[in-house]
Amino acid sequence: MEELLQALVQGFLMGSAYGLLALGMGLVYGVSGIVNFSHGDFVSLGMYLCLAIYTALALDPYVSVIFTLPAMTILGALTYRYLIKPIAGRQLLMVIQLTLGVALLLQNGLMMAFGGQPTRVPSMLESKLFIVGDVIMRAPHLVAAGVSFTLAAALYVMLQSTDVGRSIRAVQQEPRAAALMGVDVGRVQVLTFAIGIGILAIAAALLLPGMPIQPNQGLRFTVITLLVFVLGGMTNFVAIMLGGIVIGVAEAIGTIYMTHTTGQLLPYLIFVAIMLFRPQGLVWRS
Amino acid sequence: MRPDFYRTLLSPWPWLVLTVGAVMPLLLPNYYLHILTVTLIYAALASAWNIVGGIAGQISLAHSLFVGAGAMLSSALLVKLGVNMWLGMLAAAAVSAVIGALVSFIDYRFRLGHLSFALITLAFAEMAEIYVIGTDFLGGASGLFLPRDTGDITQFQFGGGRGAYWVMLGMTALCILVNLAILTSPLGYNLRSMRDNENAAQAIGVGLLRNKTLAMTISAVLTSIIGTIYARYLTFADPYLLASPVLTIEIVLFATVGGLGSAIGPALGAFLLAPVGEILRGQLGDKLPGLHYFIYGLVVIGVILASPGGVWSFIKSLGRRRS
């Protein structure tokens, strides 16, 4: 029972960060109709930027976000403008292959700059624990969940009630009509891609404390993000956060309760099961 | 009956290419022959994938599972039980066919969208890798070493370098031929109509389940056989290479860059990119870790930006402009 509670809590906390990862992907998919397979490698980039800043200035990852957020946002905008935009509207698979090319660049750029050995970036919160009853919670996980939900809520409010948000939603619903209403569709697409990558700078700092990092970890993050993103019905914010929690809990239960192999299989099994019986994902109105 | 198919078969070009291909081992040093053999393996894999991913337009990411079955299962049967590898190859192909049919059935039964299908097949492939690595009979994490290749054809041994090359040349030709045959047959028209509009295709009487299953099964069997040959060629069945979803990503990359849905495009993509990757690794692999893949990434992005519709349609448009 204690173990189950522990697994649920830990899965919930990690899962909310996975949800945040998938929100960026959902935002980009909704507006540009592209699926970014370099998503996880941008997370890696965010983490290694924190490492570089820590090595140079001894700043905590949480503080480094001040630098990594604008850097990644600009990089996201440039990536969309100069690499993805020229072939946007072509076969989905071709765009996916291009983002895989970007993933190769990022992953191996990091490999050249930092070497392939696993490293860690220390943080002030890393070893702090919160104990409620029998459940042990690591402080970085609490921070990750708190920030993820706050950010998701902030994004939601931004989409609902600011001009930028309205133009993003307009393009999401009907790009042609949005263009006729005077929305600069191209600009909105660059902007959402930049926001989508910018979110990853924050997510990277949230996931970093206590996690060993390696340049070739990107694909793993991409796959987790994709699972969550599809579970969440691609664009629905609440369902994406829920999908994150489902995958997070499945992972936690798998590691705590089962043998190594089945434990690793569990998130995929649950994903397949949910997709078969609810192909629209965790969205309640189809 | 199928004029396009026979016209292509009777034109001199394929036979010229095949002849030039067949004399290559007599001219090339071992290192380049190895690169060419690996290229042929990927060309065959990309062509086999094209039947499902290109002609039928279903982004299957499960193909590493079929390569893995072909490589790991036939090797395990040989090493652990002493089963002749020809039989192992057939057994693995049968297993792949069943899995392929099952995947098609799931797709049909639950009417999955493109992204869901891609992700579910990816989930299958990920689970297969985890399963292979966790199963001792299939070699576990350390893989399986095959007995030395003595050139005994009855034991699925082709005598190393040259023999393996010729076998792969034949296999690649077969895969392209199957693509061509499907494209010019009713099956090909059915698959393409399903790709372009599944509901409309069903409305005019195209049987979705039958056609999807047929395409996936043909593709799975070819892929599995290539997997067996690949493992035999490497004399080491490595789960991290042969059962890894990363392999599928490479196959899809070659097929897409070359030109989806055409008979020759996917193989062309492999011939364009695979040697670049191999040569870069050979030249730069030991200099600075990551550099060769970095340059490879630049090449991939460059080729895609230069011919966003696929290299084959780019070449065809050049030809049209000239004439």
Image (spheres, coloured by chain):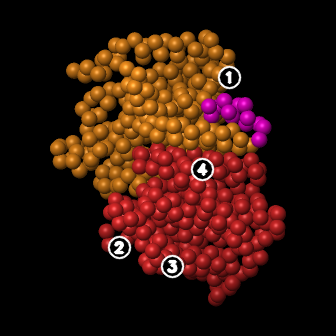
Chain colours: A red, B orange
Read off the magenta span.
B276-288
Mark 2 and mark 4 lie on one chain; the one further toward the N terminus is: 4
Q: CA distance from mark 3 to mark 1?
A: 58 Å
Q: Position of residue A254 (x, y in %)?
A: 56, 66
The reply to whether label 3 and label 4 mark residues of one chain is: yes
Residue density around tag 2, few if under 14, some if 14–19, many if 20 or more, within 10 Å:
few
Q: Which mark is residue A284?
A: 2
Please report contact status of discs 3 and 4: CB closer than 8 Å, yes or no: no
Name the residue that disc number 1 marks: B31
Q: Amino acid at mark 4?
A: Ala
Label 3 lies in what chain? A
- Reading the chain from its start, which is encountered first: label 3 or label 2? 3
Verify whether residue B220 appears in magenta. no
Residue for badge 4? A103
* Residue B41 screen position, x and y as percent: 53, 29
Amino acid at the residue labelled 1: Tyr
Q: Chain of mark 4?
A: A
